[in-house]
Image: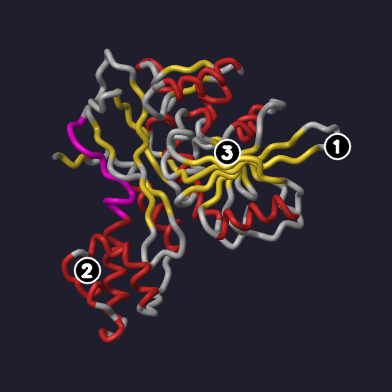
Amino acid sequence: MGKHNVLISGSFAIQFFERVTWEESDLDLYAEAGTSTEALEKYLCKNEGYRIIRQTGGLDYWPIDDWIETRTYTKKRADSTESQIQIVTTAYVPIFTIVKGFYSTLVVNVISWNKAYAIYPQSSFIHHKSYLLKKMDDYNGRSVAKYDARGWRSQDVLWPEEEASHGCIFKPRRLNDKFTWTIPLDDTDVAPAETPDFVLEFSSWKLAKCSEDDRWNISSKLLFYKTYCDKIRTPILEHCYIFQHRCFSSSRGGYEECFWEDFLQPRLIRMTLMELHKVPAAKRSQLIEDMMKSDPENLYVLRAELERCGISLPKYDHEIPGWYAEWEKTQRAPARITAF
């Protein structure tokens, strides 16, 4: 899990935090398409004795963002019962699919190779309540009903009188922030992951109330929380991150400032331009030249082109924690609003 950035989520993570066992439940492993998924499948089949029994794909089966396919594996236990594992293959880093794509706050929990994170612990494991992150339909209704039967109570969004005591729902969030219930796991004799923990833990997003027809705060409609975040890979960052992007504030008539678009993105663009100008012009392709001059905001798409040209830029991932700390200092002041 550490070597290939695999995450556990779904019902297994809920059972972990709730301290229960559901015999009919399986284990969901989320891995990015490519070497991560291939290595995980090889390990399960060759080292653990699992065999594949089903492969499914398409949004008709599981309508979540950037999900490619699910493969189901089983093996016989000593007592003749079956253990079942699902590998969920994601198009990008698994945390993006989990935070952006899941249907309710209850199921947004993750377990990495060395830590377990409950993202909405107050509502999920203290009050046993769940709130919608997607439009309600028959598919999501079946999923919600399953957890209602297991002891949770679901509603679309917080009631107005609940909002003051549930900041973890609607405030800007980051994995492993003060609202997260984080449990370190015993990693004795486990080789440390090559990817630093902060790559996962600086995943950030924000929820905002939305109605079924995407108009804001319509009291007669069934509401849900829309997740505002996006993924980013830039030429000067080694890893892929997810960052909160601008979120509309209906009460203030504009967009609230956010870490990615208003703080980090301008730095990354300027730093990328600086590094590209250090590269001899003869090595830069016409596409790179054109984007440097006319489209610098989209320089992040150049990773493949730079690789084709044999250009490797310095990486600045180690700066992310410090930059985020500076951003958090600015948030102690009243939020600024960008009007239309």
Q: Which mark is residue 78?
A: 1
Q: Which mark is residue 291?
A: 2
Of 233 and 127, nearer the camera is 233
Q: Earlier in the sequence, mark 3 or mark 2?
A: 3
Left or right: 111 with respect to 101? right
Residue type beneath disc 2 = Met
Look at the picture and state if 94 lies above or below 107. Answer: below
Task: Find out whether the residues at labels 3 and 2 contact each other: C-beta distance under 8 Å.
Answer: no
Residue type beneath disc 1 = Ala
Look at the picture and state if 167 lies above or below 303. Answer: above
Dot in front, 3 or 1? 1
Q: Which mark is residue 9?
A: 3
- Quadrant occupied by the C terminus: top left
Give the CA distance from mark 3 to mark 1.
26 Å
Residue extending furthest toward the left: 340
Q: Earlier in the sequence, mark 3 or mark 1?
A: 3
At mark 3, the secondary structure is strand
Residue 191: quadrant of the picture: bottom right
Can you give x and y, in whole percent of width and height, for residue 276 in the image? Answer: 30, 76
Dot in front, 1 or 2? 1
Give the CA distance from mark 1 to mark 2.
60 Å
Q: Is residue 261 rendered magenta in the image?
A: yes
Residue type beneath disc 3 = Ser
Residue 75: quadrant of the picture: top right
Give the CA distance from mark 3 to mark 2.
39 Å
Look at the picture and state if 218 lies above or below 180. Answer: above
Question: From which residue to which does the magenta span run?
Answer: 252-263
